[in-house]
């Protein structure tokens, strides 16, 4: 089972890779058969090829990602609040999700779920 410290470091690496636009670093955090449900309720992306496509599209928007508070890590899961600032269709948006990541025994992410809705998106 991954340690809380490992999961916290993985979350920090995830945030850094999003800011750097480093698709390879993002995908390397995930297990082969991982899923990404972003936002919760969307059709999950399954496996590394779909996950790579999902993040490649997201990274086209030059994200500015900031961790907002501590990473909560227990058992094999971590949860964290953060903000994502981006420009979409000429309009600046800030999204404030809470992500929950599940890790396998090797310390790779097996599932990521992003919790946010319209009330968590601000314009301007």
Image (cartoon, helix red, strand yellow):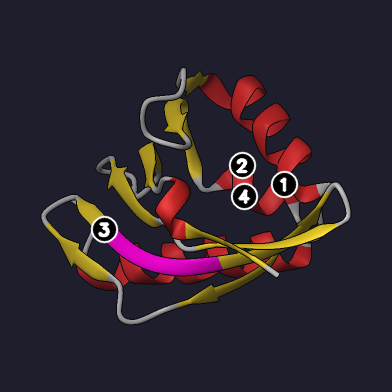
Q: How dense is the environment of label 1, judged by Cα within 10 Å: few (below 14), some, or many (20 and up)?
A: few
**Place of residue 98 in the rendered image (x, y in percent of width and height, measured from the top left):** 35, 57
Determine if the magenta segment contains residue 80: yes
Tell me whether the residue at label 3 lies in contact with that at label 1, contact meaning CB atoms closer than 8 angstroms: no
Residue 13, magenta (yes or no): no
3D distance between C-alphas at marks 3 and 4: 16 Å
Q: Which residue: 28% across, 73% down?
A: 5
Does dot 2 land on a helix, a strand or a loop?
Answer: helix
Q: Could you tell whether 45 is left or right of 8 in the image?
A: right
Q: In this view, does 97 lie above or below 34?
A: below
Which residue occupies the foreground of this view, 120 or 111?
A: 120
Q: How far apart are marks 3 and 1 (CA)?
A: 21 Å
- Distance of mark 2 from mark 4, alpha carbons? 4 Å
Is the residue under label 2 in contact with that under label 1 (CB below 8 Å)? Answer: yes
Query: Which residue is the site of mark 1?
Result: 24
Q: Which of marks 2 and 3 is nearer the N terminus?
A: 2
Height in image: 13 above or below 31?
below
Furthest residue toward right: 90
The stretch of residues the image draws in magenta is 79-83
Task: Give the vertical position of 57 relative to 29 (above or below).
Answer: above
Mark 2 vs mark 3, foreground winner is 3
Please state, as top left, top right, bottom left or bottom right, where the C terminus lies in the image. bottom right
Is label 1 in contact with label 4 (beta carbons under 8 Å)? yes
Numbered tag placed on residue 26 in the rendering: 4
Magenta: main secondary structure:
strand
SS at mark 1?
helix
């Amino acid at each position: 089972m991954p340690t809380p410290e490992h999961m916290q470091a993985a979350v920090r690496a995830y945030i850094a890779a999003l800011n750097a636009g480093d698709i390879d670093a993002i995908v390397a955090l995930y297990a082969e058969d991982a899923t990404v449900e972003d936002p919760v309720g969307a059709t999950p992306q399954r496996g590394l090829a779909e996950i790579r496509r999902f993040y490649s599209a997201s990274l086209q928007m030059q994200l500015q990602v900031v961790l907002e508070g501590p990473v909560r890590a227990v058992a094999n899961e971590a949860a964290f609040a953060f903000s994502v600032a981006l420009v979409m269709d000429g309009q600046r948006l800030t999204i404030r999700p809470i992500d929950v990541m599940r890790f396998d025994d090797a310390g790779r992410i097996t599932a990521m779920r992003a919790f946010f809705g319209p009330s968590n998106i601000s314009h301007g």
